[in-house]
Image (cartoon, grey):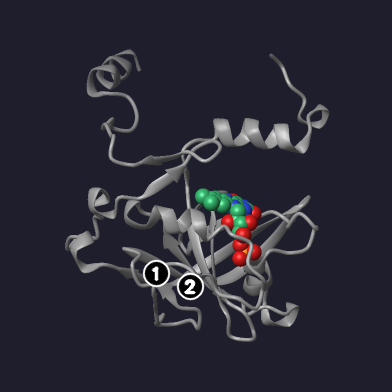
Amino acid sequence: MELDPQDLTSSDRYKLLIGSVVPRPIAFVSSLSPQGVVNLAPFSYFNAVGHSPMALMFSVSQKPDQSAKDTLRNVRPVSEGGTGEYVINLAVESYVQQVAEAAEPLPYSQSEFDYLDLTTAPSQVIAPPRVAESPVAFECKTLQIVPVGTFNVVIGEVVHLYVRDDLVDDNYHVNTDLVAAVGRMAGYDYCRTRDRFTIANGFPPEKKAALDATA
Ligand SMILES: Cc1cc2nc3c(=O)[nH]c(=O)nc-3n(C[C@H](O)[C@H](O)[C@H](O)COP(=O)(O)O)c2cc1C
């Protein structure tokens, strides 16, 4: 079938997008309100932007009443009522239940940490704490928030990283089996990241040799 997104309802566009863009990594974002309340929420419209500078993005929808989600309020610059800082923790197998539970829409004055079996650990460079149980945590400062219709894409620069010692070798290769990250599929489905295969970039040697011979 051929579909024009503008002919579809928002809910149908959502189903088509999250069923097709799979798996999506999940940012488990801890942020701090100006009043000092630590917020925690998962976002699977999430990815890397680049590594020079090291930057990440995630995209936030509105609440059903069209107001801003707590995370968006917090990550806005100080001049716009936020604190402009946040930690992107990973979503991993050992606490994926808490990742799902953190999507509970609590009042702005309440912290998800009070209801989940997860603990905070202080960050090194920014004020919001990281999730102590997260094997990797990216301390971020908001670079830009780009409005895209009813969404806001938050782009942040990583100003510090926490990586659990046993996860990286001397060359900074990460042991992804030990990280055990989970991804978001459609609906309430998640996937593991341990079913892998290896393919080198570009043409394989025989194909390259044949190409070179004709050049
Ligand atoms: C795995 C998962 C992924 C999610 N991804 C997003 C997302 O990418 N964008 C978004 O706006 N909400 C997403 N949500 C919903 C938010 O987590 C939810 O609205 C949450 O209450 C927002 O919290 P906050 O108001 O404390 O920021 C996701 C929920 C789950 C469980």
- Displayed quadrant of residue 104: bottom right
Q: Earlier in the sequence, mark 2 or mark 1?
A: 2
Secondary structure, mark 2, is helix
Q: Which residue is mark 2?
A: 113
- Residue 6 in the image: state x and y as whole percent: 81, 31
Q: Which residue appears at 34% of the width and 29% of the height? A: 202
- Residue 62 in the image: state x and y as whole percent: 73, 56
* Camera sees residue 8: yes
- The residue closer to the viewer here, 126 or 32, is 32
**Does residue 106 sit above or below 179 in this rendering?**
below
- The residue closer to the viewer here, 136 or 11, is 11
- Displayed quadrant of residue 117: bottom left
Q: Residue furthest front?
A: 115
Secondary structure, mark 1, is loop
**Disc marking residue 118:** 1
* Camera sees residue 46: no
Which amino acid type is marked by label 2?
A: Phe
Other residues around mark 2 within 10 Å, as few (<14) / some (14–19) / many (≥20):
some
Which quadrant of the picture is home to ligand 1?
Answer: bottom right
Other residues around mark 1 within 10 Å, as few (<14) / some (14–19) / many (≥20):
some
- The residue closer to the viewer here, 54 or 68, is 68
Quarter placement of the C terminus:
top left
**Disc marking residue 57:** none
**Does residue 15 sit above or below 54 in this rendering?**
above
Which amino acid type is marked by label 1?
A: Leu
User: Residues at badges 2 and 1 in contact (C-beta under 8 Å)?
Assistant: yes
